[in-house]
Image: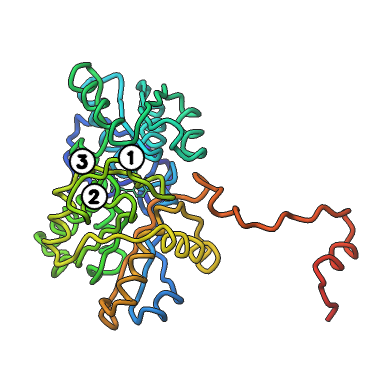
Amino acid sequence: MTTIAGRTPWRGVIVEYRDRLPVTDATPLVTLGEGGTPLILSDRLSRETGCRVFLKFEGTNPTGSFKDRGMTLAVSKAVEDGRTTVICASTGNTSASAAAYAAKAGLACVVVVPHGKVAPGKMAQTIAHGARVVEVEGNFDAALAVTRALADEYPVALVNSVNPFRLEGQKTLAFEVCDALGRAPDLHLVPVGNAGNITSHWMGYREYAAGGEIERPPVLFGFQAEGAAPIVLGRPVEEPETVASAIRIGNPASWTGAVDAASGSGGEILSVSDGEILRSHRRLMREEGLFVEPASAASVAGLSKLSSAGRVPAGATAVCVLTGHGLKDPAWGTSDAVPAAVLPPDAAAIAAHLRLDRP
Ligand code: F0G
């Protein structure tokens, strides 16, 4: 069943966690080698918060976001079911992932996105992998509603996180964290948009706890952007707005799943402002060497917020999930950049420009 050749250290989430996923010998394996992402200790954030802070960098997945964990399973099951077309609504990462896995499987892919609201890198991926793109006038919530209606009426497989196989695949992040640490973290922090991810992580941790792999699940905190925080407000947001376009969502499909994860683990769904997101985003790039997209920084912004409020127990182990790669939305990493100097290829001229001193 292995389709990743050679003695690779990682073979994709379905092969690695096969006994915990709803696959059989009849399930074709559509994988790009997703998962196996690094869990990176942040010295600076650890010092600052008084706990051990690890960053789970999902940007190293094949299409640059955590979506690939669920997409490998959703597309494999779509092929098993004899489907020839997959469809999704997206703020950009789901569509990039669906397009790539559909290409690998030889399926057609249709994506429905909010007009003018998707980061350029994500749109480029989606088009490059050959998906048919429909832009709707309206936000993500409108795109998801119409996509669900299409999937109800036509023979297309819906691969948004309302597809249970997406959540099954995404729960593997929790397994990986526990396997890497040799235990569960105390705190698990994640950005929240459509709320599938936090729902799936809670599933994963509970499964490991039930199986005795860990003593108990961590406390889960989910962070919405202040202008797109329906769960925090307790009501849908008609016109969600935030710089973090991936989580610009006003009526999350897995709302109750997110609430269950937070309340069941003793955590909470909270919001962080765009300013807090962008500050953490910049720090991740400048101090951690991690190029992430703005939405990813919501987990770290959330940790800082909890820490300032004295809500992070000293010595705890915390995991912040960094959900997507910065190359998808590079403008946010470069908007305040000083333009590069154009100089002749002359060492003396460049040294003078840089004011380098000889030893
Ligand atoms: N971070 C990134 C980079 C995302 O792309 C998303 C969701 C989230 C966080 C939130 O995850 O929806 O499971 O709560 N992006 C979806 C998409 C909505 O269409 O790509 P969630």
Q: Is residue 291 left or right of residue 12?
A: right
Q: Quadrant of the N terminus?
A: top left
Type of amino acid at the residue the image marks with label 3: Ala
Can residue 25 be spotted in the picture? Answer: yes
On screen, 207 above or below 308? above
Front residue of 127 and 177? 127
Q: Residue at x 50, y 46 (%)?
A: 329
Q: Quadrant of residue 39?
A: bottom left
Type of amino acid at the residue the image marks with label 2: Pro
Type of amino acid at the residue the image marks with label 1: Thr
Residue under numbered circle 2: 230
Percent x, y of residue 334: 60, 53
Residue under numbered circle 3: 253
Percent x, y of residue 84: 29, 19
Percent x, y of residue 102: 36, 28
Q: Secondary structure at mark 3?
A: loop
In front: label 1 or label 3: 3
Q: Residue at x 90, y 58 (%)?
A: 346
Q: Residue at x 29, y 69 (%)?
A: 181
Q: Secondary structure at mark 1?
A: loop
On screen, 3 above or below 208? above
Front residue of 226 and 359? 226
Q: Residues within 10 Å of mark 2 (few under 14, many from 20)?
A: many
On screen, 351 above or below 171? below
Question: Are the residues flagged by discs 1 and 3 in contact, CB closer than 8 Å?
Answer: no
Q: Secondary structure at mark 2?
A: helix
In front: label 3 or label 2: 2
**Of marks 1 and 2, which one's residue comes earlier in the chain?**
1
Q: Quadrant of the C terminus?
A: bottom right
* Spatial CA span between label 1 and label 3: 33 Å
